[in-house]
Amino acid sequence: MKKFAIFMVVALQITVCACGTSPNTSTTNNTQTTGNWEAILTGGTEQASLLNFVTTFSVTNSGPLDITALSFFNSGACFATGANATTESGSATLTTASAGTVTGTLTLTVNSVTPSGNSLALTGNLTGTSNGTTTTTGALSNGVVVGTWKLAGGQGDASCAGSGSFIMCQTLSSGTTTTTGTGATCTAP
């Protein structure tokens, strides 16, 4: 019995020590994006064709977008321009492979304050590259989102309803071009 008890104590000690010395097997690379993105929407008619915008947000790996700005290029009946004209929310998932290739998804919803009730929803697939490692958070570069959008009019305004496709490009260095696997292209001036 005494030998069995000693054996159990030694086995327990080996088990406890092994737990504290296991190697770090994490293979997750971390990626963050911050800065400006420009969205070009195609499709839609009348007021629903005036929806191109620039937005500024940040996110690390996955979760809600921290949106600090959004501004439409065109002033239209569906969305007013200026401070506090819209509310925005969204989320992204950035999955980074060991080679630095980033894939993921992005959703973004823009609701009008004035006029009230119009809602633009974008859903797309994100690609890019990252210099992140398992121990450092890298910066997303050459980011492109390609997907679909839908506009719903809050006041039943038929001109503020529509759908189509979009491409959203991360701000690129001057003269740079990025092409996604689907053939979508972003070019900086």
Image (cartoon, rainbow, N blue to C red):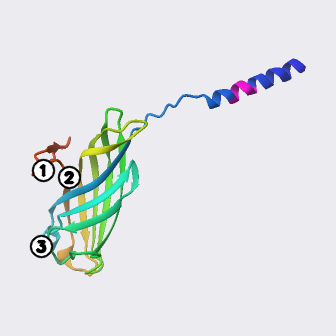
Q: How many residues crowd around disc 3 within 10 Å: few (fewer than 14), some, or many (20 or more)?
A: few
Q: Report x, y in % for residue 61.
A: 39, 47
Q: Which residues are magenta?
A: 12-16
| Disc 3 from disc 1: Cα separation | 28 Å
| Disc 2 from disc 3: Cα separation | 28 Å
| Disc 2 from disc 1: Cα separation | 7 Å
Q: Which residue is mark 3?
A: 46
Point out the tag, 3 or 1, that comes first from the N-terminus: 3
Kind of residue sitting beneath label 3: Glu
Q: Is residue 29 left or right of residue 146?
A: right
Point out the tag, 2 or 1, that comes first from the N-terminus: 2
Mark 2 and mark 3 residues within 8 Å of each other at the beta carbon: no
Kind of residue sitting beneath label 1: Ala
| Residue closest to the eye, 35 or 44 | 35
Q: Report x, y in % for residue 79.
A: 22, 75
| Residue closest to the eye, 147 or 100 | 100
Mark 2 and mark 1 residues within 8 Å of each other at the beta carbon: yes
Q: Report x, y in % for residue 9.
A: 80, 25
Instruction: Indicate the quadrant where residue 51 lies.
Output: bottom left
Q: Is residue 167 above or below residue 100?
A: below
- Most common SS among magenta residues: helix
Say how many tags the image has: 3
Q: How many residues crowd around disc 2 within 10 Å: few (fewer than 14), some, or many (20 or more)?
A: many
Instruction: Indicate the quadrant where residue 43 lies.
Output: bottom left
Tell me, yes or no, whether the highlighted magenta stretch contains residue 138. no
Q: Which residue is mark 1?
A: 188
Q: Which residue is mark 2?
A: 171
Q: Is residue 152 left or right of residue 41?
A: right
Q: Secondary structure at mark 3?
A: helix
Res 17 label: none
Farthest top residue?
3
Q: Report x, y in % for residue 136.
A: 40, 39
